[in-house]
Amino acid sequence: MSIFCLQGTFIEGISHRSFAEALSGCLSIGSVYVIREFAMCDPQASFRACNFHRYLVITPATKLEDVTASSIDFTTKSFQFTQFNSLPARSYRCSYLTDVVGRLVSISQPEYVEVKGGITTVQKVTIKDH
């Protein structure tokens, strides 16, 4: 679950299995919530959907207040731009999932390579920033 924070950035949130069903019934995509009394923890996953060093954890004490219908004006979209030439520095690190806007230059034919005793398909995609 991604939680939209008021500062205009994203943070990943997790809930324990026992709360997942209850949350799915009370949360609505596109709605805005004030989240109170939550916990924070270090991320466990090697791939994260956003560049953040902690997870928001929903606990039994957490309170969610839907403020979608309030008169407060909230931003509905958020972008964090990264320089195109900084992408190689993300290689072989704890990776963040990254979106790219660029011009597609070429796509290679699929190649079959052996990885860890199995066969996988690799295709080279070339994208330019302008």
Image: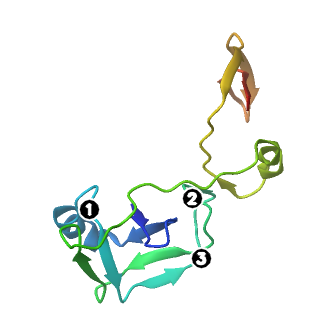
> Could you classify mark 1 by the number of other residues whose Cα lies within 10 Å: few (under 14), some (14-19), or many (20 or more)?
few
> Which residue extends farthest top?
109
> Could you classify mark 3 by the number of other residues whose Cα lies within 10 Å: few (under 14), some (14-19), or many (20 or more)?
few
Instruction: Say left or right for 83 vs 58.
Output: right
**Circle nearer the N terminus (1, 3):** 1
Residue drawn at point x = 29 percent, y = 73 percent: 72
Q: Amino acid at mark 3?
A: Asp
Q: What label sits on residue 128 in the rendered view? A: none
Say which residue label 2 marks: 50
What number of labels is visible? 3
Please identify, in this view, whether the residue under mark 1 or under mark 2 is nearer the observer.
1
Q: Amino acid at mark 1?
A: Ser
Q: Quadrant of the N terminus?
A: bottom left
Circle 1/circle 3 CB separation < 8 Å: no
Q: Nearer the viewer, residue 16 or 39?
A: 39
Instruction: Say left or right for 50 vs 102.
Output: left
Q: Amino acid at mark 2?
A: Cys
> Vertically, is 15 above or below 29?
below
**Circle nearer the N terminus (2, 3):** 3
Residue 122 visible in the shown view: no
The kind of secondary structure element at disc 2 is loop
